[in-house]
Amino acid sequence: MTPAVQYVRASTGLQACSLDQQALANAAYAALRGFEILDTYSDGAASGLTLRQRPALQRLLAEALSPARRFKAILVYDVSRWGRFQDIDEGAHYEFLCRRAGVAVHYCAEPFENAGSPEANLIKQVKRAMAAEYSRALSERLTLARRHMVDQGFMVTPPPFGLLRQAIDGAGRPIGLLSRGQTKASKAHRIVFVPGPPQAVATVRRIFRLYALTGLSRGAIAKTLNAAGAPSPTGRGWTGDRVQRVLRCEAYVGTYVYGRVRYSLGRASKMAPQDWKRVENAFPPIIERAVFDLANRLLDARRRRTDAELLDDLRELLVQEGRLDADLIDRWPYMAHSGTYDRRFGGLSEAYRRIGYRPARARP
């Protein structure tokens, strides 16, 4: 018996049965050809577009190229299971590396012997091109289908923190809430967003209240939430950046925005704002529009400014208040945080010096 291993792959979790079907076909091939399958390398719910997202195939190739390998052959169901690489030479390259190392790749369900004949090589190249084209066409169809569903008022992306996915039937009746990663039970069902756990919703509302109504900085809000043990998107606490993502998220006012990033053939690309698809009043809001708009005006005002802009803000505050100190700067809604002045100028005193201000306690 020739020692061999098998590689199986399914594109999505919904194709889990495909792994068993591939293994059965490989076992039948092995029994007829005198192979003993020593091990199985399985990439479940893994796209065939790249090697990067397929850890099992990466391990298999590493072992195939190792002098200490235990096998002489790799059994694969068909050419597309080996990969749907958009550059068809990539799949051929990995097969060549194995063959050069003395490990043959057998496609168990293909109508040709992978023995290097001109006919087999031609058919393999055609099959690789067909597999690549199938993925390209499928990607286009899925993109159009998702945009059509968004037009109908349904959600096709994960919900932000504080919201949950709810499956509904064709009549709009709720069926049940879906947890993270859970798929709907039927293709006929649709997904909408609904308010999430009360603690998460309360945290979102607290973030907007603290930022828009009290002028607290993003970092200070993160510290406040962490001290209170508030739930967070990742479970690892809050940071200033995570607070900002909440403040920028229009889903909290019931607006669904789709298409900021386009995923196609294993690659992500940012889209221009004019290409985004926006659906107003897509679901019940948990934040009032006036509060959301105020928070975002503050964010825009507190964007990263030049040194000259920071000093101009200090001069304006000095004119209005007649004095300057760290607490006053932090309370002023359209000012950068006092810590920003510390980092940019090496301390508030240096920033004061540049605008010609001397605090009363520093005067002789």
Image (cartoon, rainbow, N blue to C red):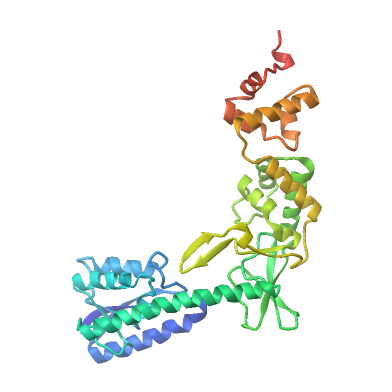
Q: Quadrant of residue 342?
A: top right
Q: Residue at x 72, y 53 (%)?
A: 203
Question: Looking at the picture, how far across and down is residue 69, in whole percent?
Answer: 23, 69
* Number of numbered tags placed on the structure image: 0
| Location of residue 158 with respect to 172 vertically, above or below | above
203 vs 362, nearest the viewer: 362
Left or right: 288 as drawn, with respect to 344:
right
Question: Looking at the picture, how far across and down is residue 1, in whole percent?
Answer: 20, 85
Residue 142 visible somewhere in the drawing: yes
10 vs 153, nearest the viewer: 153
Left or right: 129 as drawn, with respect to 356:
left
Q: Residue at x 61, y 47 (%)?
A: 241
Q: Residue at x 71, y 17 (%)?
A: 359
Question: Looking at the picture, how far across and down is residue 237, in whole percent?
Answer: 62, 50
315 vs 157, nearest the viewer: 315
Left or right: 27 as drawn, with respect to 252:
left
327 vs 49, nearest the viewer: 49
Q: Residue at x 35, y 83 (%)?
A: 78
User: In what quadrant of the picture does the C terminus appear?
Assistant: top right
Question: Looking at the picture, how far across and down is residue 259, in whole percent?
Answer: 60, 64
